Amino acid sequence: MKKQALWKDIFREIGHTKARFISIFAIIMLGVCFFSGIKAAGPDMLDTAGTFFKEKRLMDLKVQSTLGLTEEDVALLKDVPEVDELQPGYSADVFAGENGVILKVFSYKPEQALNQYRLMDGRLPEQSGEIVLDDLLAGEYVLGDKIVFSGNGTETDLSESFVTLEYTVVGFARSPQFIEKNNRGTSTIGKGTTDAFAVIAEADFKLPVYTEAYLSFKDTADIEAYSAEYETLLEQHTEAVEQAMAGVPEARLSELRAEGEAELAKGRAELEAAEQQLAQAAGQLTEEQQQAQAGAGSEAAEQLAAARAKLPKASSSWRR
């Protein structure tokens, strides 16, 4: 009896305030819908990203050095436990085009296993002088356009880093390294951030050492990206890489310092040799000047003696 009275009271209250009941019900429904969408979107986005990463074999770790990585450094990285793929490469920050777009230029070779590209148009570079641009620049360039690297008024000599500075656009692509449209990482030039990435043939770089190396590991292949297990494994591998590379920066700095001192010593030796040659030339010039002065003095003395010899004859003829 009490329950029936309660239900009658509830329905009577709803009947008297229909507008308020419908408003509250709609607000609750909207909240439930938003919450359900957000709860479902997160896993879906992670799953989409994970699928893209696996499809294009995104690296697990990136080792980068401002002093470069030598073949010996790459060999050290190969000995890190659980390493599956090791891919050394080159990259550089440049200004490009008339509007001074800041590009992060990566090297590419057909057999590379990691960080593969998803072509949106055209093809990947096959020979020197060809370039693939970030899909973000598809509205500014078309296939066949020419693009020129520059220092944008700086003293940077790009010819020391690249075989050629003029490239033909042959494609547009997306990279698993950049999944955010408004973020292409940092740069060492300009405003400090990169506008887009670009890809050229590895042969178009002429740097003496690698600038970076990408690693993937065997035990992370089947682990979901962004999961706690993956992050734990990545921390362990990061520690292993740091241990393997311990002391490498100092050794590389000492090597560069030794090369610089050798070049300096060579320059000093060349300068000393040049100074010796200059001193010898100056000595020869002084000797020749002395000889010339001595010859000129003897000639003048002979002329004076001849003049004196003529003088008595003229005097005696006058007396007569």
Image (spheres, rainbow, N blue to C red):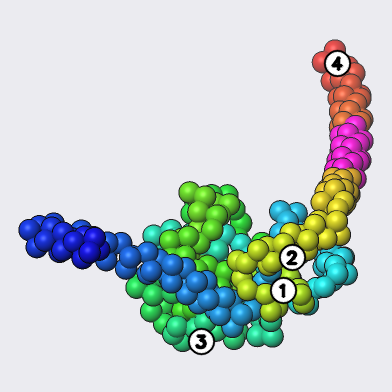
Q: Amino acid at mark 3?
A: Arg
Label 4 sits on what residue type?
Answer: Ser
Number of the front mark, 2 or 4: 2
Residue 119, placed above or below residue 310: below
Q: Say whether residue 32 is left or right of residue 76.
A: left
Q: Please tell me which residue is depicted at 30% across the width and 62% down the height of the picture.
A: 31
Q: Is residue 204 left or right of residue 300?
A: left
Residue of label 4? 315
Q: Which residue is mark 2?
A: 233
Q: Residue 235 has which mark?
A: none
| Kind of residue at disc 1 | Thr
Residue at the spot of label 1: 220
**The magenta stretch spans residue 58:** no
SS for dot 1: helix
Percent x, y of residue 281: 87, 41
> In the figure, 274 relative to 290: above or below?
below
Residue ID at (61%, 62%): 92
Residue placed under numbered mark 3 in the picture: 123
- Residues 221 and 150: in front is 221
Locate the C terminus and report the quarter of the image it occupies.
top right
